Amino acid sequence: MKTIKYFTLLAALCLLTLQAAAQPRISIFFDHVSEIARQEHISVREAAQRVRQLGVEGIDVRVTMSDDQLKMLDSLGFQNASAIADINFVRGEQPQAVRQALDFMKRHGYKRLLIIPGLLPENPAPQLMDEVCTRIASFVTEAAKEGIDVMVEDYDNPRSPCYNTATLDRLFAAAPALNHVFDTGNYLFCDEDVMTALHHHLGRIHHVHLKDRKAMHDYASLPVGTGIVPLKEVMGELLRNGYDGWFTVEHFGAPRMLDYATQSVANIQAAWRALSSPSFDEVLKSRRSVRSYDATKKISEAEVRELIRAAQEAPSWANQQPTRYYVAISPEKLKAVQDLVGGNKERIKNAPVLIVSTFERGKSGFFRGQQTNEIGDAWGAHDNGLINSYLILKARAMGFDTLIMGMRDADKLRALFQIPENETVMAVIALGYRAEEPRQPMHKDLDEIVRFY
Ligand SMILES: Cc1cc2nc3c(=O)[nH]c(=O)nc-3n(C[C@H](O)[C@H](O)[C@H](O)COP(=O)(O)O)c2cc1C
C-alpha cells in the first residue's frame, strides 16, 4: 500500500515537472533574420545569434538557401522548422522546381515543406483549378514516398489557389495527404473569422504562422499578440487539440524587425505560460534546488525582467525594497560569475542566467537613519530572502529552475559589477532549465518546527 502511494506521488511529481517545463516551439523565417542584419547593420550570423537569445529555436528557410548559411544556423543550434518552396503549379508541371525542393529536403533533413503554388490569372479557365489540384496531389504523393509532409497556407492574395477555406478545402479534397500551415493573419485578409477557420482545419494543421494585424482591413504587420488576432485563444485551442508543432513568428515589412521579434517572442511565451500555468501548490512542490542545467535552453532578458517584476510584489520593511540585482546574461559575464561561486561552478556551468542579489544597508529595520530594534541590518537580509523566495517560485511558475548559492566570492563579485560599498552581497541565483530531475530533500517533522498555543 505504502509502495503504491509512493509511486503515485512520484508519477504525479514527474507530471507536474513536465507540465511546468514544456515550452512553446518558436521559430522564425530566415528572411526575418536577414532583415534584422540589414536594419541593425550587423552580420547575419550575429542577427541569428540575437534571435536565438530571444528563445527562438526553429528556423524556416527557403529551399534555395546556401549550404554555408544552413551550416551557420546549425552551429547556433537552430532546428529545422519548415522549408518553403515556390512551385508554380498554376503554370504547369514544374519538374525542375520539384526536384530542387525534394533534393533540398533530403539533403538537409527537413521534413515539413510549405509550397507556394503560384497565382491564378484574373479570369481563370474553369478547368485550371482542377489541373492545379491534380498537379499538387501528385506532388504530395511523390513527396510522401520520401517521408516529406507537404503543406499549403492560407495565402493573402485572392488569386492564390489556397486563398480561403473554400479553395483550401478543394485542394485538401483532391490531395488528402496535403496539410495546412495555419496563418493567423491571413484569414482576416479573406474576411474569415480566425477561430472558425481554426476549428474547421484543426486536424490538418501541421505548422502555424503567428501573424497579427491592426484591424480587419489594415494589413500592416504587427508584433504577435499586439493586434486583433486572439493569440491566447488560438494557441489554447491548438494545444487542447494536441498540436505540438512550431509557432513561426511572422511580420514581413516590420520597420524594426528585431524589436518586433523581441515583442512577439515575449508575447508568445507569456500566452503559453498563461495557458499552462501550474497551480501554486504545484509550483511549491516542483521547485527544487537544481544542480544541473540544460545547455541548449536560453532565457531572454525580457523573461528575466518579467521574473523580477513579479518578485517585486514581495513585502519589505516599510516598503524599503532594499534588494538590488546584478544579472549576468552575456557569455563573458556568465563565465566571470561561474568562477566566483566556489564548488558550485560545475553545478551551474550551463545555467543561461546568474543573478547576484544584494541589499542596501541602513534601509530595512531603520527609521530616519536610526536602527529601530536589535535586528538592525539583518532585516535587510530578511527582505532580501523574501524577495528571492518570490523570485525562485515565480521562476518555477514560468517553467524555469533555480539554485540559490551562499557559496560565492562577495569581494570579487563586488568588483566585477561595481557594487557600491553600502550594499551587502547576498546569494547568487542560477536560473535555467533542469537537465535532470533534482533530489528530493527530507523535511523535518512538522511538530519539530511548529508549536501551537
Ligand atoms: C541561503 C542559501 C544558500 C544556499 N547555498 C547553496 C550553495 O552554495 N550550493 C548549493 O548547491 N546549494 C545551496 N543552497 C540550496 C540548499 O542546499 C537547498 O535549498 C536545501 O538543501 C533544500 O533543497 P531544495 O531547495 O531542493 O528544497 C542554498 C540555499 C539557501 C537558501
Image (cartoon, rainbow, N blue to C red):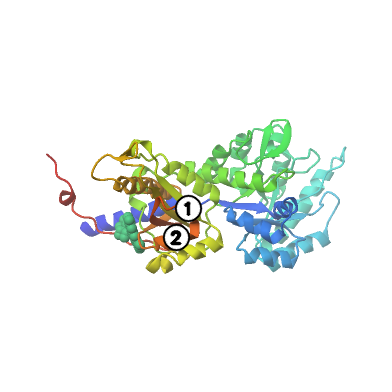
Is residue 377 positioned above or below 149 on the image? above
- What amino acid is found at the position of numbered circle 2 in the picture? Leu
Picture disc at residue 326:
1
SS of the residue under disc 1:
strand
Q: Residue at x 41, y 63 (%)?
A: 436
Q: Quadrant of residue 161?
A: top right
Residue 104 x, y percent position in the rendering = 73, 64
**What residue lies at 36% left-to-right and 58% top-to-bottom?**
289
The answer to whether residue 127 shows anywhere in this view is yes
User: Residue 315 in the image: x percent, y percent?
Assistant: 35, 39
Residue 365, above or below 13: above
Mark 1 residue crowding within 10 angstroms, few (<14) / some (14–19) / many (20+): some
Q: Locate residue 203, reporting x and y percent.
A: 59, 46
In what quadrant of the picture does the C terminus appear? top left
429 or 393: nearer the eye?
429
Disc nearer the start of the sequence (2/1): 1
Q: Residue under circle 2?
A: 413
Taking the image as drawn, is residue 394 in sight?
Answer: no
In space, the residues marked 2 and 1 are separated at their CA atoms by 10 Å
Relative placement, left or right, of 201 versus 20 is right
Q: Position of residue 107 (x, y in %)?
A: 70, 68
Asked if marks 2 and 1 touch (Cβ < 8 Å), the reply is yes
